[in-house]
Image (cartoon, helix red, strand yellow):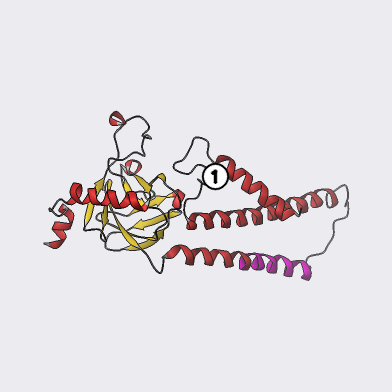
Amino acid sequence: MGLKTFLIAVAVFCMAGSAVAAQPEPWQITFQEPASPVMRMIEEFNITISVVIILITVLVVVLMIIVFFRFNEKANPVPSKTTHNTLIEVMWTALPVIILALISIPSFKLLYFQDRHPDPEMTLKVIGHQWYWTYEYPDHGGVAFDSNIVPDDELQEGQPRLLAVDNKVVLPVDTNIRILTTSEDVIHNWAVPSFGLKVEAIPGRTNESWVRIEKEDTYYGMCSELCGVNHGFMPIAVEAVSKEAFALWIAEARKKFADGVPHPRLAARQE
C-alpha cells in the first residue's frame, strides 16, 4: 500500500467514524454524512486537500529534523558562507505553483458542479427575514409559508433544541431542485451541511444553487450569516420524502397555506 492510499484510507475512516446525516452531534469534528452529490464531491475534495496538507507537513517536519541535527553549532562549528542555491530556489518556487495548479483542477470542477443544475425539475424559493424564513413553491400553485424556530418551552419529544421549526421545508428525494435565495432586510445565508449548501440571501438580489437529496430523512441547518441579535435562532429544517409522499403533502399544503387566499407576501407583490 502506497503512502497516499494509506492516508486516504485513514481520512475516510476518521470521517466515517463521526459522521451523522441529519444534524450535528456533540464532539463531532468532521463533516456530516453527505446526502447530495454536491456534498459527496465536497467530501472527496476535502480528502484530497487533507492528503496534500499531510504530505507537505511531513516533508517540512523531515526537513526541520535534518536541519536540527546536521546544521547545529556542534555539528558545524564553522558555518557555511553559502548565500544562494539556484536549484533550491527554483524548487521552492516551482513546487508550490505545481501543487496549486493540481489542486485547482478538482476545485474548479467542484465550483462548476455546485453552481446550478442545467435541467431542474422543481424550484424552491427561500426568503430571509429577521429572524425567520419564508419558503415558496412557485411550481406548485403558489404554496408559501413562514418557518420559525420552536421555543424551548414548546419543544416536543424528539425535536432538537435550536434546530426545530414550526413548518419544515418538504422536498422530494431523487429530484433536481433549484434553490433561489433572497432577503427582505439584511444579508442571511441558507446553509444545510448535509447538502453542501451555503447560499447567501441578499436584499435586491436572487442567488441560485441546487440540490438532489439522495435519501429520506430530516436535515437541519442554520443561518450562516451574522444577521442580527437573533442570528442564532434562525434554524432550517428540511424533510426529505419520497416523490409520492411529496405529492400528497403539496396537495395538503395548497389547502393549508393557500386555500384560495394568496400568501400575504405574495399578495403584497401582486398589488
Q: Is residue 45 visible?
A: yes
Viewer-side residue, 158 vs 141:
141
Viewer-side residue, 7 vs 241:
241
Answer few, some or many: residues within 10 Å of disc 1's Cα (few below 14, many 20 plus, some between 14 and 19).
some
The residue positioned 69% from the left and 69% from the top of the image is 94
- Quarter of the view holding residue 124: bottom left
Q: Residue 147 location, x and y as percent?
A: 27, 45
- Is 77 on the left or on the right of 95, as rendered? right
The residue positioned 32% from the left and 55% from the top of the image is 187
The residue most toward the left is: 271
Viewer-side residue, 245 vs 218:
245
The residue positioned 29% from the left and 34% from the top of the image is 151
- Quarter of the view holding residue 97: bottom right
Which quadrant, please, contains the C terminus? bottom left
**Where does the magenta region start and end?**
85-101
Q: Relative to 202, does residue 249 appear above or below in the rendering?
A: above
Residue at numbered disc 1: 30
Q: How many marks?
A: 1
Q: Residue 150 location, x and y as percent?
A: 29, 36
- Element under label 1? loop
The residue positioned 50% from the left and 42% from the top of the image is 20
The residue most toward the front is: 244
Q: Relative to 166, does residue 184 appear above or below in the rendering?
A: below
Amino acid type at circle 1 is: Thr
Q: Relative to 168, does residue 197 appear above or below in the rendering?
A: below
Q: Residue 81 location, x and y as percent?
A: 83, 62
Q: Is residue 256 magenta?
A: no
Q: Is residue 91 magenta?
A: yes
Predominant SS of the magenta segment: helix
Q: Relative to 29, does residue 90 appear above or below in the rendering?
A: below
